[in-house]
Amino acid sequence: PHIQGKKAAIIRFNGRGMFFIKYDFFSGYVLTNELGFLPSQVVSGGDIHLSLESLPDLDADYIFLINDAGTGDAFEKELTESPVWKSMQAVKNGRTFKVEGDHWLSGGLIAHRKVIDDVKGLIAK
């Protein structure tokens, strides 16, 4: 019920920067094809690199954050402490979630099932 008509985006942090996970693989596939989230226009088109300048264009109701084995700490901090981030509707509505685990960055049925369970648990609160 929460998901119907809502858009979601996944942001991955690693040592090289901040990136969107596209909807054709890994947890991005699960969000749109298994759970029924709509794709964000920003993530669907163009570059997967995320910059603070492009953040205001992100049209996502829910945002999931993945820090790749802690390698993206500096970039995660840069994003989540920025005024632009704090002004976003998803942030103000408490609809941003930090998710842990390799299953968000891998394929396969078990990984997909775990992502589904994570999302259901997070947005049901």
Image (cartoon, helix red, strand yellow):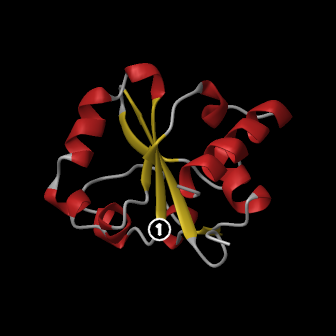
Q: In percent of the image, x 52 and y 31: which residue is there?
A: 100
What kind of element bears circle 1? loop
Q: Residue furthest front?
A: 125
Residue depicted at x 70% and y 61%: 32
Residue 47 seen: no
Say which quadrant the N terminus sits in: bottom right
Residue placed most toward the observer, 20 or 3: 3
Image spot of residue 62 (x, y percent): 49, 62
Q: Which quadrant of the structure image shows residue 65?
A: top left
Q: Dot 1 corresponds to which residue?
A: 60
Side (left or right) of 94 relative to 26: left
Report the front residue among 120 and 86.
120
Disc 1 residue crowd, few under 14, some 14–19, many 20+, Cα 10 Å: many
Q: Residue at x 71, y 52 (%)?
A: 29
Amino acid type at mark 1: Ala
Hey, which residue is sitting farthest left in the picture?
Answer: 83
The percent position of residue 87, horizontal first and vertical second, equals 22, 67
Residue 74 lies in what quarter of the image?
top left
70 w.r.t. 19: above or below = above
Give coordinates of residue 3: x percent, y percent. Answer: 64, 69
The residue sitting at the right extreme is: 109
Task: Inspect this view and state whether residue 4 appears.
Answer: yes
Up/down of 112 relative to 95, above or below = above
Residue that appears at 39% across and 22% down:
70
Query: Looking at the image, is 100 positioned above or below residue 35?
Result: above
Looking at the rendered structure, the number of numbered marks drawn on it comes to 1
